[in-house]
Image (spheres, helix red, strand yellow):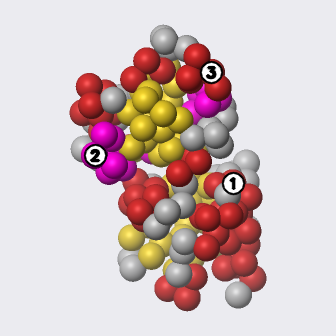
């Protein structure tokens, strides 16, 4: 029970209150490090949602981002991208600031970013290199380094 509480509180701290309530915790499986005993990964229905990073953050998989985004969470951590960029980003290429249509207010450098295509479908997940304010102002430069795209 302590592990589920830690997961819920971590999700709420990193992604906002909506993320903490979007997961059915009774169906979540968690794995721990054998060496340290710390939480390592969490999954739902046999599919990995994310893993805990050494800096205390959470790295979501594409499935995990889609899972939370489809339940109404992570809107503040998402970036809507242009149709031109969605194909390249889904293959794992970085997202440039000029291709961002709208940006959630929780986007900060080194934070988790969920990239959403024009159809509203999660296209990729990655690490933001710029803040939401900078992404809106800049017309050049890499905004998000993609970790996992839908097509890779």
Residue on which disc 1 sits: 14
Q: Residue at x 51, y 44 (%)?
A: 78
Of labels 1 and 3, earlier in sequence is 1
Image vertical order of residue 62 relative to residue 47, above or below? above
Report helix, strand or loop for mark 1.
Answer: helix
Image vertical order of residue 12 relative to residue 32, above or below? above
Look at the image and tell me in which quarter the N terminus lies: bottom right
Q: Residue at x 39, y 79 (%)?
A: 45
Residue on which disc 3 sits: 134
Start and end of the magenta stretch?
117-132
- Mark 1 burial class by Cα count in 10 Å: few <14, some 14-19, many 20+: some
Residue on which disc 2 sits: 119
Query: Quadrant of residue 94 in the image?
Result: top left
Report helix, strand or loop for mark 2.
Answer: loop
State the CA–CA distance, disc 2 to disc 3: 25 Å
Look at the image and tell me in which quarter the C terminus lies: top left
Q: How many marks?
A: 3
Q: Residue at x 49, y 12 (%)?
A: 139
Q: Is residue 122 magenta?
A: yes
């Amino acid at each position: 029970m302590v592990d589920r509480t830690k997961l819920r509180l971590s999700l709420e701290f990193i992604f906002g209150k909506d993320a903490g309530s979007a997961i059915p915790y009774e169906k979540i499986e968690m794995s721990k490090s054998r060496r340290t005993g710390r939480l390592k990964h969490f999954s739902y229905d046999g599919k990995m949602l994310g893993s805990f990073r050494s800096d205390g953050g959470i790295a979501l998989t594409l499935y995990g981002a889609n899972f939370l985004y489809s339940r109404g969470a992570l809107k503040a951590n998402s970036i809507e991208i242009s149709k031109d960029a969605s194909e390249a980003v889904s293959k794992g290429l970085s997202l440039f600031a000029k291709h961002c249509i709208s940006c959630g207010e929780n986007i900060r450098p080194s934070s988790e970013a969920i990239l959403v295509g024009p159809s509203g479908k999660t296209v990729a997940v990655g690490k933001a290199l710029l803040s939401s304010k900078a992404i809106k102002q800049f017309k050049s430069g890499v905004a998000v380094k993609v970790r996992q795209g839908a097509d890779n």
